[in-house]
Amino acid sequence: MILRTCNPIGACLALLLALPAGAADLLMLDRVDCRSGVVRLADVAAILNAGPQEIDALGKIPLMPSPAPGQQQTVRAQSIRELLAAHGVDLGGLRFRGARETVVLTPVAATTREAAAAPTASEPDAAEPAAEPREQTGFRGYTAPPAEPAAAYPRAPRRVQLSAQRRERLEEQLAADLTDYVQMQTADGMLEVVGVELKPHNAATLAANRGELSISSTTALRVGRQRFVVSFSTTAGPVKFPVMADIVEARPAVIARRQTPRGAIITAADVYVAPLPSDYRPRGEESIATSLEDVIGKEAVSGLRPGEVVTDANCLPPVMVKRNSVAWATAGRGGIRVRTQVKVRRDGRLGDIVEVENVDSRELFEARVVGRNQLAVLTLGGAAAHALAQDIETLRLR
């Protein structure tokens, strides 16, 4: 008998690859309770706008071991992106919404609490409460009717005092929620919301009663100043207030779709264009790639991780000439072009200016790398210029 084993994770990924391409929404939750040994995607996010098979396949993808009982752990949306990409999920078909980080808590087992609360067999039964004096004597006295419960008056939404840093984080989170709303309503992934203005009392109310937000707009969504209406439910009833913000065209950036090893040539399957992440921080003076044409065919000079922004610091033109290799240098004057063999003194990428040595005369001069083992000669001097002039005149006489 031949036994065949099946990897459940591999089966999920195979099912995802077999499903039709579509843009599913992952609504990240603020806080979840994990009751199993492994935290899966369905535990931390609600999967929307996808078919039943895709929802089931995505939800079964494992993310991390669950925290110890009574402990909690925070997982960020960016970390989930990287884990999904490591499992082979196409991030271009997913839209992340909701919270930017999720608190995962493993509660203490209910059986442990019940066992602690239940009396043991060796403990004596609790004595019944003694009868009231009038019941002991047999006299019937006046018994007041049970008091009616006090009327539950609605309370105003609870407000808290916010620090400047807390209010700034609240406005950033609200801006992310508004951006998700605008992109879904306009089907334009390059629009984002900035410059959120929350009045102090509205910010305090929102901080104390943050729940499922409902967002609407009073006018058509377009680039410029926009008035939104934010509403949510509280113990005192629904709360609604306006929010002013700006809709702008997001700065595009090329993002790595999957792991790309160092030295590999970047292809269209390795990257995609998306809005520049708000948490991106440049490392020194680096230029961000904004289109696929800027990076396709170039070399990953350092390994690219899924979700990493592609810049001129980690993506450069490929090396076209090698150190100590023999290449062809081309020069021209008056419509006549002369090629000569040169020895390259150092590695050069496309567009670099490198020092070369004439194989015949040993003259050193500079040339620009224009192709594979191809260079264009710059200004020459000395013996190199004289030799070139003689070559050109010889060609004219012929």
Image (cartoon, rainbow, N blue to C red):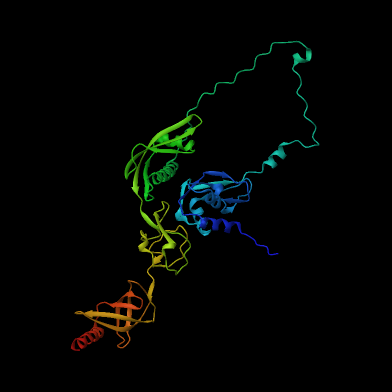
- Quarter placement of the N terminus: bottom right
Residue lying at the far front in this picture: please name it: 1
Q: Where is residue 385 in the image (x, y as percent from the top left)?
A: 23, 83
- Quarter placement of the C terminus: bottom left
Q: What residue is shown at x 74% (from left), y 17% (from top)? A: 132
- How many callouts does the rendering have? 0
Q: Position of residue 79 (x, y in %)?
A: 50, 54
Q: Quadrant of residue 252?
A: bottom left
Vertical arrangement, residue 357 with respect to residue 174, above or below: below
Q: What residue is shown at x 69% (from left), y 41% (from top)? A: 111
Vertical arrangement, residue 125 with respect to residue 261, above or below: above
Whether residue 319 sits left or right of residue 10 in the image: it is left
Vertical arrangement, residue 250 with respect to residue 359, above or below: above
Whether residue 204 sits left or right of residue 141 in the image: it is left
Q: What residue is shown at x 47% (from left), y 61% (from top)? A: 258
Whether residue 336 sits left or right of residue 81 in the image: it is left
Query: Closest to the observer: 22 or 197?
Result: 22
Q: Where is residue 339 in the image (x, y as percent from the top left)?
A: 28, 83
Query: Closest to the observer: 94 or 236?
Result: 94
Q: Quadrant of residue 182?
A: top left
Vertical arrangement, residue 152 with respect to residue 311, above or below: above
Q: Quadrant of residue 349?
A: bottom left
Q: Position of residue 307 (x, y in %)?
A: 45, 57
